[in-house]
Amino acid sequence: MSVETTILEMAKSARAAGRELSRCPTDRKDAALLKIADQLEADAERIKAENGRDVSAAKENGLSNAMIDRLSVTDATISDMAQGLREIVRLTDPVGTTSETWIRPNGLEVCRMRIPLGVIGIIYESRPNVTIDAAGLCLKAGNAVILRGGSEALNSNRALAEAVAKALSDANLPETAVQVVPVREREAVNYLLQQEETVDLIIPRGGEGLIRFVVENSKIPVLKHYKGICHVYVDESADLQMAEEVCFNAKVQRPGVCNAMETLLVHQSTAPEFLPKMAERFAQAGVELRGCPETCRLVSSAQPAEEADWYAEFLDLILAVRVVENMDEAVSHIATYGSNHTEAIITSDYNRSRRFLREVDASVVLVNASTRFNDGGQLGLGAEMGISTSKLHAYGPMGVDELTTTKFVVCGNGQLRS
């Protein structure tokens, strides 16, 4: 079977499975999720063995240590995947819930009802755990899903897909509700992006290059984020001990992820006391600072920043630092260079915090907390499908609710339009 035919048949079968899932009651979906969790644990040795093949090939092909880390599946990884599914079971099922009803003058009762999106295509790199997170969230929301992981994780994803398929069969749900594209050929992505008649939404997860390729080539709506250029603004009223701890966590705890701080903004009245001490702590952690002229004056070890540094998603122990005159300049900087991902302010002034929340446009805006909290699990959504920086139809971490839409439901007793 050709790659094109393979994708076409997968999309058709996913559409049929999605129709069945849309009618599926919560208890049956939850039972299937629990069976998948149990099956993952039962198949742990086989999954790890298949993952070992991928990891060995990745090392031979010279993939970075960061990529290999994301690719690797351990006992802890499998336990986390299974636990994530069990947590999804505990989430409220949004499907079938309705908004408050309103009555029109002619007696019609109108409300909105939550329904599944239908069929979702997910294109991602490395991270086999995405396979299970996505399967679990889509099933809970009543959607079928087609998963196209990176070729470097194909053996791992096939093993995971087999475990999911067995569990779905045992739960008397269609195995084609969750499908992994079984081929390495890159044209599989192109064919998937053309299935506008059967696939309702595409979600890419990966680097900016992958996401831009998907957006430029898809006939299907795409939920995306290109970059995570996240800022922390240390205000003039900030508790400096708190600011130090939050900034260190936001940059150093896991620098290679999209919600890590990439630019630090500091009020000019705070900078002389805060920056030298903060820079010393960053230096001990191996963080390279690239600063504005005032930053370089206060911190001798800082390198002069170039214009490109303010736009950069470093994903590394590198941080751009700028001293700003006031909050106006901080908000303006974020509006110019930010990516609508995650922004934070450290302040003890309530009015300033409210202003920052109102004026800064990002999928998550925080007060006195690390940018690293822009995560579905951390915000109480269970697992997440990703973080959307587009505003239609979701903004921020995508949990179960964001994998549904609404339809109008209208009830009458014979009304006719005049």
Image (cartoon, rainbow, N blue to C red):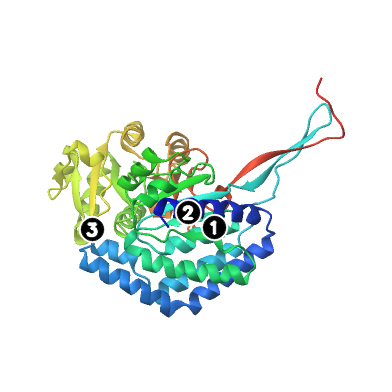
Q: Tell me if residue 346 can be seen.
A: no
In this figure, which residue is indicated by the disc labeled 2?
Answer: 385
Cβ atoms under marks 2 and 3 closer than 8 Å? no
97 is higher (above) or lower (below) than 58: above
Question: Which corner quadrant of the image does residue 3 belong to?
Answer: bottom left
Question: Nearer the N terminus, badge 1 or badge 3?
Answer: 1
Measured as percent of width and height from the top left, residue 73 is found at 37, 71
Q: Nearer the viewer, mark 2 or mark 3?
A: 2
Crowd tier of the residue under label 3, counting other residues whose Cα lies within 10 Å: few below 14, some 14–19, many 20 or above: some
Query: Which is more toward the observer, 17 or 236?
Result: 17
> If the image is split into quadrants, where does the C terminus sit?
top right
* Spot occupied by residue 166 in the image (x, y as percentages of width and height): 55, 71
Q: Residue at x 79, y 29 (%)?
A: 104
Q: Amino acid at mark 1?
A: Leu
The answer to which of 57 and 140 lies nearer the viewer is 57
Q: Mark 2 to mark 3: distance in Å?
A: 34 Å
Q: How many angstroms separate mark 2 from mark 1 (CA)?
A: 7 Å
Circle 2 SS class: loop
Mark 3 highlights which residue? 281
Q: Secondary structure at mark 3?
A: helix
CA distance separating discs 1 and 3: 39 Å
Residue at 32% from the left image edge and 59% from the top image edge: 254
The type of residue carrying mark 2 is Met
Position above or below: 366 against 86 = above
Q: Indicate the amino acid at tag 3.
A: Arg
